[in-house]
Each structure stands twice: as structure tokens, then as C-alpha cells.
Image (tube, rainbow, N blue to C red):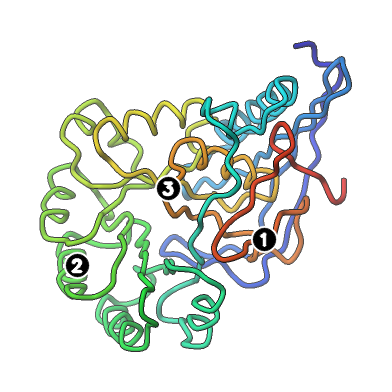
């Protein structure tokens, strides 16, 4: 395919409230959109939004944007939504997502009720932000008022020692925990396997991509991996990773890297292609006070996918 023009469009987007994890706090998301125009007049889009503290470097974010823009053009030429082009299956209409909250210590019963009324079945909270004992107490308090059918997805972002992680997991016994991501500050396959053997729910790795070697897939120490395509430099490398995981009976969850609407749409197409039945961490657009483009509304925890060829990104302001 011949590219007739290319340009980068920087953005700085304010968040409605701080995005707080054990690794710090974000109040603004800075990145740039790549706009490619083909010789036949099609426009392809990519989103580069580095986040070094979560392993998304300038290089991998740029590679993700460049590949997305090219795949957008290729899928448009093929007349297929990107998810259908990636999977070889009929187009998907939606992916199911969780509701993203901040730290569990700041949880409110009203917000949980709102999420339940909106149709979400999985609520995601950050842990590892405060003292372990305080977070355990908050978790039990939340479980007491949690509406029936709701489950909790937790993310420690590598906050804990083995002893703290072991204590936290033990305190989760009998609670409606759907999964726990990145429990260890210095994870190893042996330590993760020991923790997973004590947990009734899946443990997951996200940032710890250095563990994803051949031994990991032959002897999975955890039951789930979280894929952020921008961390792996693109959608195609992420598809390969997802296929390896599925072949090893490892669950795959796709989450955004808090990209703008452009990158979020690309991640949603990818999620629909590789794990259509999972509940993904892609409901992050609501954190933005402004965005680079429009997104379909999330209704009943379903993120609607554009049916138009390609990614389907429509910019709001350039």
C-alpha cells in the first residue's frame, strides 16, 4: 500500500479525577495521534501514549501507533472491521468490560450501586496503595454491601512482598474475588505458583512481561495474563502472545493503557478478536474530561464496536 501523507498530532488530555495506583498518580494523559493517508484517499489512525512506569516506552508506543494506522488502512481496503480482519471470523458487535474504580480505600457504596444498576458484573479496584491491613478491612466492608452477582477484580500493580501478598490472598477466602493482578513487587515463577496454589481465583501478570518465556507457557505459574497491546509494540505481536496463552489454557484479558479514544478502539477490536467471551479492562474512557474522538456509549457493560471497515476512529478535534 502506498502512503501519500503522514503526520503526528499531539494531545494532552485532562482526567476527571486522578488515576492512582501503587506506582503513582496521573492527572493528564499526553500522547500523539498518527494520521496516515493512502494514495487512494483512505485515512488510517494510530495512538502513541507512552507510560514508562507501566512498561510502555516511547518506542513501543510509537510502534503500536504505526502498526495500528497501517492495519486500519489494510482492514479498510479489505472492507472489514479490524476485529474481523484480525480474527478471520464474522465481525463482533461488542466486547464486555468491567467498571474501573480507583483505590479500594476510596470506594463508595453509591458508586458500586451505580455500577450495578448500569449492568456491570465485574468491578475493578486498585490495591497496594495503602496499608495491607486497611485494604483488607475495606475489602470485607465492601463485600458486605456488594449486590448479588457482582465480583471484584483487584490490581496491586506489583506492590507487595510475598508475605503481604500471601496475607492478602488468605484474607480473600470466601469473598467474591474474580482475580488479582500483579501481587508481587519482585515476581518469580516459583513465588507466583506458590501464591496461585493458595488462591481460589486467578492470579494474573500484567507489567511482568519479562516472565513470558517458553518455560512460562509450558508450566504456567498463574491462570491469567493481561495484555496491553502498546506494551508489546503492536496488535500482531499481541495476537501471537494471546494465541500462546490460550494454547496453554491461560486466560487472556485485554486492558487499555489509558490511551485516548483512538488507542482504546484498537484495543477493543483486538480483545474481540482474541478473547470475545472475556470481560476486559477497556471501560476507561469515562475517566477523561476530554478525548481525541467519539466513542460508542457503554451500555449494560458492553463496549459497542464500530461496524465500519478498519478501526472506526472518528476524530473530534485536530
Query: Label 3, label 1: how many angstroms apart (C-alpha)?
Result: 32 Å
Residue 229 in the image: x percent, y percent?
51, 38
The residue at the point 60 percent across, 36 percent down is 91
Q: Looking at the image, is mark 3 or mark 1 nearer the viewer?
A: 3
Q: CA distance from mark 2 to mark 3?
A: 26 Å
Q: Which residue is label 1 attached to?
A: 28
Which element is circle 2 on? helix
Q: Quadrant of the C terminus?
A: top right
Residue at the front extreme, as displayed: 90
Q: Based on the displayed image, in which of its 4 quarters is residue 162 positioned? A: bottom left
What is the CA distance from the residue labelled 1 to the residue labelled 2?
A: 33 Å
Q: Is residue 15 left or right of residue 106?
A: right
At label 1, counting other C-alpha atoms closer than 10 Å, the crowd grade (few under 14, some 14-19, many 20 or more) is some
Of the numbered discs 2 and 3, the one sitting upstream in the chain is 2
Residue under pointer 3 = 277
| Closer-to-camera residue (117/25) | 117
Write down the residue under mark 2. Answer: 169
Q: Nearer the viewer, residue 162 or 217?
A: 217
Residue at 47% x, 53% y is: 280
Residue positioned 39% across, 82% down in the render: 147
Amino acid at each position: 500500500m502506498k502512503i501519500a501523507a503522514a503526520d503526528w498530532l499531539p494531545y494532552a488530555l485532562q482526567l476527571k479525577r486522578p488515576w492512582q495506583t501503587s506506582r503513582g498518580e496521573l492527572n493528564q494523559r499526553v500522547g500523539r495521534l498518527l494520521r496516515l493517508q493512502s494514495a487512494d484517499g483512505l485515512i488510517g489512525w494510530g495512538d502513541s501514549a507512552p507510560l514508562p512506569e507501566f512498561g510502555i516506552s516511547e518506542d513501543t508506543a510509537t510502534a503500536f501507533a504505526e502498526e495500528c494506522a497501517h492495519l486500519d488502512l489494510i482492514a479498510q481496503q479489505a472492507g472489514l472491521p479490524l476485529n474481523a480482519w484480525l480474527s478471520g471470523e464474522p465481525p463482533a458487535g461488542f466486547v464486555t468490560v468491567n467498571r474501573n474504580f480507583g483505590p479500594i480505600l476510596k470506594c463508595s457504596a453509591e458508586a458500586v450501586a451505580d455500577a450495578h444498576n448500569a449492568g456491570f458484573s465485574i468491578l475493578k479496584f486498585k490495591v497496594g496503595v495503602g496499608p495491607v491491613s486497611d485494604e483488607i478491612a475495606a475489602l470485607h466492608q465492601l463485600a458486605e454491601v456488594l449486590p448479588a452477582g457482582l465480583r471484584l477484580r483487584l490490581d496491586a500493580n506489583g506492590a507487595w512482598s510475598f508475605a503481604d501478598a500471601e496475607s492478602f490472598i488468605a484474607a480473600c477466602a470466601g469473598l467474591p474475588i474474580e482475580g488479582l493482578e500483579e501481587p508481587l513487587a519482585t515476581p518469580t515463577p516459583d513465588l507466583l505458583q506458590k501464591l496461585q496454589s493458595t488462591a481460589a481465583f486467578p492470579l494474573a501478570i500484567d507489567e511482568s512481561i519479562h516472565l513470558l518465556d517458553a518455560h512460562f507457557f509450558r508450566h504456567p505459574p498463574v491462570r491469567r495474563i493481561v495484555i496491553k497491546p502498546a506494551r508489546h509494540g503492536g496488535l500482531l505481536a499481541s495476537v501471537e502472545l494471546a494465541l500462546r496463552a490460550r494454547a496453554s489454557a491461560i486466560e487472556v484479558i485485554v486492558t487499555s493503557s489509558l490511551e485516548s479514544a483512538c488507542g482504546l478502539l484498537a484495543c477493543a477490536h483486538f480483545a474481540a478478536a482474541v478473547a470475545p467471551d472475556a470481560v476486559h479492562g477497556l471501560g476507561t474512557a469515562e475517566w477523561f474530561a476530554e478525548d481525541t474522538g467519539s466513542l460508542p456509549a457503554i451500555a449494560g457493560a458492553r463496549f459497542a464496536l464500530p461496524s465500519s471497515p478498519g478501526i472506526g476512529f472518528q476524530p473530534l478535534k485536530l
